[in-house]
């Protein structure tokens, strides 16, 4: 019996929301919360998953880790074992022991952290070195696990962010050609901090709203005769008859432009400009894409009133977390203002978290 340990962070997305499945641009960063998985090989083909956040373990065999067979929270873990075997990997039976500090359902990619920590641990167990090429293969396998086994039709932002980011940097991802570029995020040195506020409104990407947005985008692209919305212009979008499709497509087109502008703002240290882009992104997600909620809007409005340079929801939406870029000396005041606003609105107390950037998924121990 041998064992290895993989660790993967969660992520926030600085900007570029609901663009990944439209072949667009996004700029996520890893956060200092992580999931650690210890994988121990077995003599038989049994598979078990235990987690410090779940009462009941998952038990099965390699034959029950695939689409339709696996169920419940552990699908994100065992789906990765299935996807890797689909890629031709030979795996022993395995016991997976999960520990996590990534809040679940908070829009911070707890599922991608689980998938990627399993994938990295399995690399260790099978004697593979975590090269750049292998990281790309793991992104693909974890995406398959999430869409085909867990049934969440997501776009790859999360797995790419946690597997491909460099320490201390955001990751500019272009989903049209799959290219990535590290974008150092030195806001700390410039006296700015990125705050993360978990609204405690739990979000799920398997419950229809996310998939419906995806379908709207596909319908809009089809109506325009384009393979995706990536190459659509605002003029094209203005010609769409259906007002809902027009609004969805307008979000995607303007959001891609905001990502490019945000990279330029970061690289020239123009934090005020970055803040304005974050605000515009939130407005677009709220009004055109309709994936915000009252709690997210309240975090954003309150943070801006209390001195944030910019704030926006992050991740898929319908709950989850918001981020705010604030002068470091205003951080406490912004947090207190958000707490007071939530109490006054009768919302459950939010949870305050730190942002990164931290670093990508790593193999902590191999046999
Ligand atoms: C979720 C999905 C991602 C991405 C975002 C929205 O996090 O998992 O693929 O679509 O929502 O940007």
Image: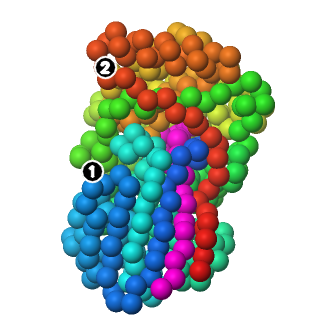
Residue located 57% across and 44% down the image: 31
Residue 210: % across, % down:
31, 45
Dividing the picture into quadrants, the one containing residue 163 is bottom right
Residue 34: % across, % down:
52, 51
Is residue 193 in view? yes
Disc 2 versus disc 1: nearer the observer? 2
Q: Is residue 245 magenta?
A: no
Q: Would you call the spot at circle 2 few (<14 residues within 10 Å), some (14-19), or many (20 or more)? A: some
Q: Nearer the viewer, residue 8 or 324?
A: 8
Q: Nearer the viewer, residue 269 or 245?
A: 269
Residue located 71% across and 38% down the image: 185
Q: Nearer the viewer, residue 295 or 240?
A: 295
Residue 48: % across, % down:
33, 73
Give the secondary structure at mark 2: loop
Q: Which residue is mark 2?
A: 347
Dividing the picture into quadrants, the one containing residue 260 is top right
Q: Is residue 15 magenta?
A: yes
């Amino acid at each position: 019996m041998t064992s290895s340990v993989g660790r993967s962070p969660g992520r926030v997305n600085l900007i570029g929301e609901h663009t990944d499945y439209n072949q667009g641009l996004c700029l996520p960063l890893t956060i200092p919360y992580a999931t650690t998985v210890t994988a121990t090989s077995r003599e038989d083909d049994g598979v078990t998953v235990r987690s410090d956040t779940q009462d009941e373990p998952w038990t099965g065999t390699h034959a029950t880790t695939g689409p339709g067979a696996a169920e419940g929270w552990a699908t994100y873990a065992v789906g990765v074992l299935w996807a890797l075997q689909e890629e031709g990997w030979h795996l022993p039976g395995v016991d997976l022991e999960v520990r996590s500090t990534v809040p679940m359902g908070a829009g911070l990619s707890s599922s991608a952290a689980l998938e990627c920590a399993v994938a990295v641990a399995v690399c260790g167990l099978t004697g593979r070195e975590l090269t750049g090429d292998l990281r790309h293969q793991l992104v693909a396998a974890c995406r398959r696990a999430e869409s085909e086994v867990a049934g969440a039709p997501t776009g790859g932002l999360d797995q790419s962010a946690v597997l491909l980011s460099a320490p201390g940097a955001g990751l500019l991802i272009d989903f049209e050609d799959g290219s990535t570029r590290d974008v150092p995020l030195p806001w700390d040195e410039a006296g700015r901090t990125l705050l993360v506020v978990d609204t405690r409104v739990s979000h799920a990407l398997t419950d229809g709203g996310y998939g419906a947005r995806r379908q709207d985008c596909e319908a809009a692209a089809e109506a325009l005769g384009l393979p995706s919305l990536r190459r659509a212009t605002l003029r094209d979008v203005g010609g769409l008859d259906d007002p809902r499709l027009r609004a969805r497509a307008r979000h995607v087109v303007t959001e891609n432009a905001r990502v490019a502008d945000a990279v330029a703002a970061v690289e020239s240290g123009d934090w005020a400009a970055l803040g304005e882009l974050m605000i515009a992104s939130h407005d677009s997600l709220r009004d055109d894409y309709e994936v915000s909620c009252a709690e997210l809007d309240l975090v954003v409005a309150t943070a801006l009133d209390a001195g944030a340079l910019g704030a926006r929801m992050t991740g898929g939406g319908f709950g989850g977390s918001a981020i705010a870029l604030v002068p470091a000396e205003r951080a406490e005041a912004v947090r207190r203002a958000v707490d007071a606003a939530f109490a006054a609105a009768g919302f459950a107390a939010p949870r305050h978290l730190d942002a990164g950037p931290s670093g990508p998924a790593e193999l902590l121990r191999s046999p």
